[in-house]
Image (spheres, rainbow, N blue to C red):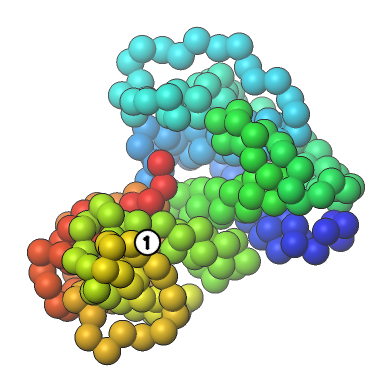
């Protein structure tokens, strides 16, 4: 049990997902580590390398001194360059090397979380080396490992844990970006509303309300006359909001009612993760 209860849900979600990942990859053959995942340019090995690398950074380990090859097409900006270093440095590691480093990293991180005595507002290293509150950092780690657990499950054909503790963390993080997508990026008109209706393993309904100044807010109350209603299953919502699929590839899984132009604009800009 961590000292601060506000950290516990994220620690529990992180633990559930990281242990599921360990169970998934432990029996893999060398060839299976090379399977492509929904993350552009990343194999199973690359996703696990990313997880190991970021968790090591949370432990305070120095980042590797490593020069990236110039032919990595999925490395397109500062964020992807930063993330790729921890991946590329492990790109030729064998299956036993990967699983042993993952296990050792998990043990170290679990010990760190068990002994965590810092205030949740304490500044720690964030995703790009910047300083963020400890609670926010752990929340991001819970989301990231659950999302990558799903990437690995998709690559390996082993579905599961769509309603695990990490799924609830992911729901809240992905929903946090919805108001901006609707109001600013898709340009929903002032004094309008857009409803998102999600069913499946996690069921919820949210409404984005755009005020007279064009500012969007998210709430749980239904709207009687929304400009657009988007209905989809939970798995499709996650894949769209996390940028794992493009809208046209899951058009048969999304039901859009209302203004077709606005619905298309929202779906085109639906992804809220980097």
Indicate whether 269 appears above or below 162: above
Name the one closer to the observer, 95 or 229.
Answer: 229
Viewer-closest of 27 and 117: 117
Question: Which residue is at a point 60% across and 31% down the rendered structure image?
Answer: 130
Q: Quadrant of the C terminus?
A: top left
User: Residue 107: x and y, percent?
Assistant: 80, 42
Relative height, residue 122 to residue 218 (above, below): above
Q: Please name whichever residue, 150 or 34, is drawn nearer the observer in this view of the structure.
A: 150
Residue 93's x, y, as percent? 58, 23
In the rendered image, which quarter contains the N terminus?
bottom right
Per the image, the residue denoted by label 1 is 178
Relative to 257, is 37 on the left or the right? right
Residue drawn at point x = 44 percent, y = 36 percent: 43
Residue 237 in view here: no
- Placement of 249 over or under 75, stated as above or below: below
Determine crowd level at label 1: few under 14, some 14-19, many 20+ residues with C-alpha closer than 10 A: many
Residue 242 in picture, x, y percent from top left: 39, 52
Q: Secondary structure at mark 1?
A: helix
Identified at 72% across, 39% down, the residue is 123
């Amino acid at each position: 049990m961590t000292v601060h209860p506000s950290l516990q849900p994220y620690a529990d979600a992180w633990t559930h997902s990281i242990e599921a990942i360990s169970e998934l990859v432990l029996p893999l053959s060398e060839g299976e580590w090379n399977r492509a995942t929904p993350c552009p340019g990343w194999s199973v090995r690359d996703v696990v390398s990313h997880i190991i690398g970021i968790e090591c950074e949370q432990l305070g380990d120095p980042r590797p001194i490593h020069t990236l090859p110039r032919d990595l097409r999925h490395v397109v900006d500062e964020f992807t360059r930063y993330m790729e270093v921890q991946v590329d440095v492990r790109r030729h590691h064998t299956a036993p090397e990967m699983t042993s480093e993952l296990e050792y990293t998990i043990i170290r991180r679990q010990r760190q979380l068990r002994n965590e005595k810092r205030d949740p507002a304490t500044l720690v290293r964030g995703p790009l080396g910047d300083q963020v509150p400890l609670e926010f950092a752990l929340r991001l780690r819970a989301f990231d490992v659950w999302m990558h657990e799903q990437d690995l499950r998709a690559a390996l054909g082993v579905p599961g844990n769509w309603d695990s503790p990490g799924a609830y963390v992911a729901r809240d993080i992905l929903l946090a970006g919805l108001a901006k997508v609707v109001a600013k990026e898709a340009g929903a008109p002032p004094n309008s509303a857009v409803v998102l209706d999600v069913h499946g393993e996690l069921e919820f309904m949210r409404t984005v309300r755009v005020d007279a100044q064009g500012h969007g807010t998210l709430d749980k109350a239904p709207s009687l006359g929304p400009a657009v209603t988007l209905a989809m299953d939970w798995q499709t919502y996650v894949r769209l909001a996390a940028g794992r699929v493009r809208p046209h590839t899951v058009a048969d899984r999304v039901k859009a009612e209302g203004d077709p132009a606005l619905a298309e604009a929202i779906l085109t800009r639906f992804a809220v993760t980097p």
